[in-house]
Structure formats: C-alpha cells, structure tokens
Image (cartoon, rainbow, N blue to C red):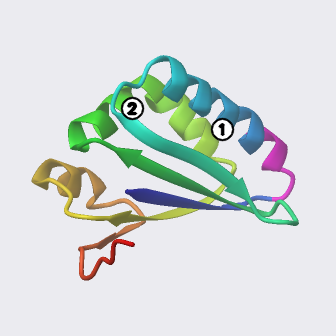
Amino acid sequence: MGIARFVFHAGAVDEFTRLSRQCVQIVEQEDTGTTRYEVYLNADRTEAIVIEEYVDAAAFFDHLAHVGPDLMAAISKTGTLTGEVLGSPSADLRERLANAPVSLFAPHLRAIT
C-alpha cells in the first residue's frame, strides 16, 4: 500500500482536484491491478492524502505508465509531496523510490478481526 501526502502551494488546490480526477479516471479506465485508489482532502483544503493499493509492484508500474510523466509532473507541482510505502516492496520498486521523498515501512504486526 502507498500513501501520498500533499501540502498544497497557495491557490493550487483546485488544480490538484482537477488533476486527481484525471488520475481516478485513468485508474477506472486503464488500470487492471489497482485495488484501491482514494483521495482525501482535509477540512480547510490545504492538504490531501492519496491511498493506493496494487496487486503487485508490476501493477504499480503499469499505473505510473498509464498516468504518464506529464500528469505526474503537473500534479507534483501543486504542492510538496511526501509518501509512505507499507509492505515488502520489490527490489525494483525500492530502486525506483531510492531518491523519492518516500519512507518504506516493513510489516511488523497485523490483527485480523
């Protein structure tokens, strides 16, 4: 699972919401391995969280290819981006995230109710 966090630049929330709608459309129309893609805004619309889950790292790479570098660059310009990856990422994914503002968290405990 991945969590992307945005702190918006002044006046950029409307652009973020427009671009995030494009991302959701891409997920719905093109992605086959995305199992969760949710966008949340805080009450004053200064921050967002995007929660993403994929069946495997290959599905994540497919998602990135579908979104494309231009849309990724545009949405990244709306704010400061940080993130977390929860789980056991593949070596390929670790390598691609090496210089990104992303923290990796390995599984520790899990309760199923």
SS at circle 1 = helix
Q: Quadrant of the N terminus?
A: bottom left
Q: Over which residues does the magenta segment extend? A: 10-15
SS at circle 2 = helix
Residue at x 27% of width, y 82% of height: 109
On residue 63, the disc is: 2
Residue at x 44% of width, y 18% of height: 30
* Distance between the alpha carbons at the discs numbered 1 and 2: 14 Å
> How far across and how far down the image is residue 38, in percent?
59, 47
Q: Callout 2: few (<14), some (14-19), or many (20+) C-alpha neighbours within 10 Å?
A: many
Residue 58 vertical position relative to residue 30 in the rendered view, above or below: below
Question: Which of the 4 quarters of the picture holds residue 47?
Answer: bottom right
Q: Using the image as rendered, state which of residue 24 and residue 35 is in the foreground.
A: 35
Q: Does the image show residue 12?
A: no
Q: Amino acid at mark 1?
A: Ser
> How far across and how far down the image is residue 101, in percent?
42, 65
- Is residue 83 left or right of 8 when viewed as pictured? left
Question: Which of the 4 quarters of the picture holds residue 97?
Answer: bottom left
- Is residue 54 left or right of 43 when viewed as pictured? left
Q: Does the image show residue 27?
A: yes
- Is residue 45 left or right of 52 when viewed as pictured? right
**Comes first in the chain, label 1 or label 2:** 1
